[in-house]
């Protein structure tokens, strides 16, 4: 067993995206203790930075020491109690995972299905809300990583509130890459990740809980199943004032990385980051369309940071992705579920969203598909 | 908000320990995709390395993408079903956390109490096993990080098996620092962390499941509460043969760090690492005793890598630790629970276990306590 030296890839898949060298360097800074006052001051800066990019004043805004799926689980395990009725709008893989979370917790999942590749239908949600007056939670994905479709969070949240439901929103792929306003849109609980549009290393998730979610948490009748993800306990570590209660050992070096990624996105400005993602999406789109490669998702619902395109007829999915990886060091992602072998998912997330990557990707595809 | 530049500390607390520069550099290597064939080959090396240091052939030996407490939870959430009777031997903080895990899962916790700072009593465990013929799991901590006491894992496991119980063992602080033989001692499920005697960054936990544990997992009547920690799903990612099933995005850069820490411990040899920890403990112990500073734990049960010492009378705990941190950049840990303000916990774990650290710590304490 010898030291591992990874190749230098260009990551244009569904995530992780390219990690900026400043963030890689930040992670390599010397580890200090998780109770060191200097570390705790940095934790406070992280919380403030997260509030800025989530566009929220929620006090309970913080990282979870595990990947995006644990962020999802942190929301569900804290908010769903046995027999809670949770309406889940499913239009891709991650909605299905939400359902898994709910049923494992003893909750009742009411499924609203939309076609993969389409936005969530507000009409269907309203229908489900009318038919299920006992439902108390609505959950859905803002930006479906499995298809590249984005949904209208603002309208969906408004609807849910009209029927006295709180909302849980998956923003793993949206945060930093597309408009997102937690307070203005009245999102009650939201989770995201670091490995998409923040250009940071994979391994950390980000959550923010508003008033309604905290009230649900505070009025639970049963204890939270998970000790590790119990926000009542984690809050004492992240929100403790002078004295922090030890909960678990924080992933110190990854938090250095997250901190630096926040510094960078604040330098750029979150709104400018949205604009950059949109602009680069246009560039890629024009190039792909010039090659007669078409998008899965309708123009209106397309995510700029995740481009799902139909694989041109007569070409083998795995073979082409393998050539891209081996000959060009370029990673793009396969389709999932029914779209396996039928679409490619080309990510333009965070630091991956830049002109030189687009030029490389278009040129490589041109060379390969011409053969 | 500006880039964060941590001070350079010497970490001689209860963890994290000093992270070796080779491991810091490994983490800063460029991120590649978690489904990249080159990454998957590295995952296989990690599994092999872990088997070597755990001294096991268990196929189900792998990292969990979250800190030690999630490793604990991975063991309990996969093995404990509602109404399972779990005997937990508690002689410190982490035994108490095991109890929390069991009750949250709907299991029945039967507590065997030992004094903090003492090893677990095999007699008491036998008594509990006799009185609870329906118990099916025994759980305990090998090396209590809260006190620095180690217990006789081999005898405790043998006892548990005589009464048809499977065993869950916490080896967070022991792995790499003191003798541990998963197969020879017939440990059924074990978890550890990276941030103690492996000299790696905090944020990853390590687990190994033997035959009995896998059988318990396979014959569950209920689904595992946690989707994120469900080993049935995680195994498909870590143990898949040609095709890996996507489960969650692995913390790629932290796994680079874990890989390098395994390369280093294999270079040294796990047995040599145990010897180094013992030798350095003797050095520290001699120095402390020369200053009339005494140990909490009996000589026989002392962990070499975590030295709990009584704070000399007349000295203020927080003030002295603060001088050590601010004037010497040296971190040692406070006591927990009833030992708050009464003991210090001085770690000599992994890369922190070296002569220059001991000399610094002893000299600093001498200067401060002389004042």
Image (tube, coloured by chain):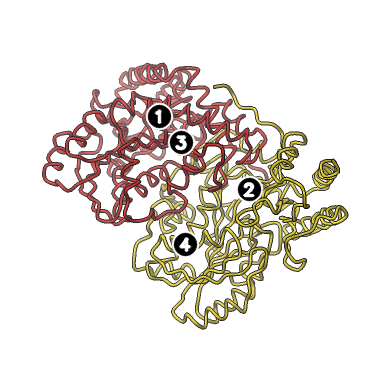
Chain colours: A yellow, B red
In front: label 1 or label 4? 4
User: Tag 3, which chain?
Assistant: B
Q: Which residue bears the numbered disc 4?
A: A76
What is the C-alpha distance between the residues marked 3 and 1?
Answer: 26 Å
Residue at left offset 25%, top offset 23%: B299
Residue at left offset 34%, top offset 26%: B180
What is the C-alpha distance between the residues marked 2 and 4?
Answer: 21 Å
Q: Which residue bears the numbered disc 3?
A: B62
Mark 1, secondary structure of its residue? strand
- Whether residue A104 is situated above or below residue A183 in the rendered picture: above
What is the C-alpha distance between the residues marked 3 and 4?
Answer: 26 Å
Q: Using residue A155 as the reference point, say whether residue B220 is left or right of it.
A: left
The mark tally for this picture is 4
Q: Is residue A170 visible?
A: yes
Q: Using residue B154 as the reference point, say whether residue A60 is left or right of it.
A: right
Q: Which residue bears the numbered disc 2?
A: A195
Q: In the image, residue B49 lies at what x, y percent?
A: 48, 26
**Contact? badges 2 and 1 (CB < 8 Å):** no
Q: Earlier in the sequence, mark 2 or mark 4?
A: 4
């Amino acid at each position: 067993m010898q030291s591992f030296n990874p190749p230098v890839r260009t990551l244009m898949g569904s995530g992780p995206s390219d990690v900026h060298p400043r963030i890689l360097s930040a992670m390599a800074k010397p580890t200090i203790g998780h109770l060191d006052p200097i570390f705790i001051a940095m934790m406070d800066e992280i919380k403030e930075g997260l509030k800025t990019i989530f566009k929220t004043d929620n006090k309970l805004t913080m990282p979870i020491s595990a990947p995006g799926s644990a962020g999802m689980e942190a929301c569900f395990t804290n908010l769903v109690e046995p027999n809670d009725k949770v309406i889940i709008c499913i239009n891709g893989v991650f909605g299905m995972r939400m359902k898994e979370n709910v049923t494992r917790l003893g909750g009742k999942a009411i499924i609203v299905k939309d076609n993969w590749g389409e936005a969530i239908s507000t009409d269907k949600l309203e229908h489900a809300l009318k038919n299920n007056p006992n439902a108390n939670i609505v959950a859905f994905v803002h930006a479906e990583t499995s298809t590249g479709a984005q949904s209208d969070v603002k309208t969906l949240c408004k609807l849910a509130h009209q029927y006295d439901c709180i909302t849980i929103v998956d923003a793993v792929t949206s945060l930093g890459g597309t408009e997102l306003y937690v307070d203005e849109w009245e999102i009650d609980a939201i989770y995201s990740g670091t490995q998409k549009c923040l250009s940071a290393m994979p391994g950390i998730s980000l959550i923010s809980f508003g008033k309604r979610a905290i009230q649900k948490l505070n009025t639970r009748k049963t204890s939270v199943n998970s000790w590790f993800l119990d926000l009542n306990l984690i809050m004492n570590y992240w929100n403790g004032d002078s004295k922090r209660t030890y909960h678990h050992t924080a992933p110190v070096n990854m938090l250095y990385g997250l901190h630096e990624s926040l510094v960078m996105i604040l330098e750029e400005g979150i709104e400018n980051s949205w604009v950059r993602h949109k602009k680069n999406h246009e560039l890629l789109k024009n190039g792909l369309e010039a090659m007669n490669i078409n998008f899965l998702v309708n123009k209106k619902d397309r995510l700029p940071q995740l481009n799902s395109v139909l694989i041109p007829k007569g070409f083998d999915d795995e073979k082409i992705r393998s050539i891209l990886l081996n000959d060009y060091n370029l990673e793009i992602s396969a389709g999932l579920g029914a779209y396996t072998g039928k679409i490619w998912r080309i990510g333009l997330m965070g630091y991956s969203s830049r002109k030189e990557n687009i030029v490389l990707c278009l040129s490589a595809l041109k060379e390969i598909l011409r053969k």
